[in-house]
Every structure is written in structure tokens, then in C-alpha cells.
Image (cartoon, helix red, strand yellow):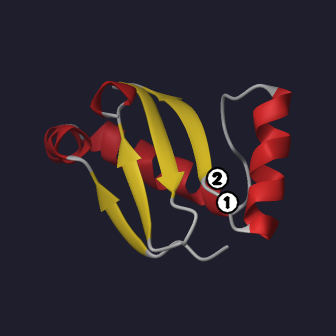
């Protein structure tokens, strides 16, 4: 799947700078995301994401980290992939 520009919100970036463990977790969850492991989602959302990769729809994955839940969203047009905390949505 094309990912476009990879960005993080200010909140995620700030925590990553201050917390090496969280920064390492971001690398791990991004590797999972690239493999099609959508994290902590229900089966219906996994199926939707698997289909979205093929039909060029938006993909949203969710992962639990030491700093709380992190979402990774790739926009439908594959222009950008964003790391964010749900509270920043």
C-alpha cells in the first residue's frame, strides 16, 4: 500500500522526543501497519481495512502503547499517513 508522506501530530512527536520507549514502539507499530496488522480493532474493522487497501479507501489502525492508544491513518488518496492520539482527531 502506498503511504504518502509520513507525519505525526504535535502530541505524538512531543512524546516521542521525550520518551525513547515510545519512540521505539512507534517504529514497531509502523512495521506492523506496513504488514497489514491493523492492531487493536474488531474483526469488522480488520476486514474493512483489508478491503480499503485494494479499493483505495481510508485505512485506520489502532495500537496500544506505553503512552496510550495511537492511531495510524492513511488517507484514501494515499497522500499522507498520520500518527496521532485519538484525542487529537
Q: CA distance from mark 2 to mark 1?
A: 19 Å
All told, the count of numbered labels is 2
Discs 2/1, front = 1
Q: Nearer the viewer, residue 73 or 28?
A: 73
Is residue 46 found left or right of 60 in the rendered image? right
Rendered image quadrant of residue 45: top right
Q: Earlier in the sequence, mark 2 or mark 1?
A: 2
In-front residue for pair 67/78: 78
Q: Is residue 81 left or right of residue 39?
A: left
Q: Secondary structure at mark 1?
A: loop
Above or below residue 4? Residue 59 is: above
Front position in the image: 64 or 78: 78
Q: Position of residue 73 (x, y in %)?
A: 50, 51
Which residue is at 85% across, 43% downward?
Answer: 47
Q: Quadrant of the C terminus?
A: top left
Neighbour tally class for label 1: few under 14, some 14-19, many 20 plus, Cα within 10 Å: some
Q: Which residue is mark 2?
A: 32
Q: Position of residue 30 (x, y in %)?
A: 52, 55
Is disc 2 surrounded by few (<14), some (14 to 19) or many (20+) residues within 10 Å? some
Quadrant for the N terminus in the image? bottom right
Query: x%, y% of residue 74?
Result: 52, 59
Badge 2 marks a residue whose secondary structure is helix
Q: What residue is shown at x 84% (from left), y 31% (from top)?
A: 44
Residue at 60 percent of width and 42 percent of height: 61
Query: In percent of the image, x 23 and y 44: which residue is there?
Result: 16
Vertical comparison of 56 with 65: above or below = below
Is mark 2 in CB contact (under 8 Å) with mark 1?
no
| Residue located beneath label 1 in the image | 57
Question: Which x, y percent locates residue 8?
Answer: 29, 53
Amino acid at each position: 500500500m502506498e503511504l504518502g508522506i509520513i507525519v505525526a501530530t504535535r502530541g505524538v512527536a512531543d512524546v516521542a522526543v521525550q520518551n525513547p520507549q515510545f519512540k521505539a514502539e512507534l517504529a514497531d507499530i509502523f512495521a506492523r501497519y506496513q504488514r497489514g496488522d491493523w492492531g487493536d480493532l474488531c474483526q469488522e474493522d480488520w476486514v474493512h481495512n483489508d478491503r480499503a487497501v485494494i479499493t483505495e479507501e481510508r485505512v485506520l489502525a489502532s495500537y496500544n502503547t506505553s503512552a496510550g492508544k495511537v492511531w495510524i491513518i492513511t488517507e484514501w488518496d494515499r497522500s499522507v499517513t498520520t500518527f496521532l492520539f485519538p484525542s487529537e482527531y
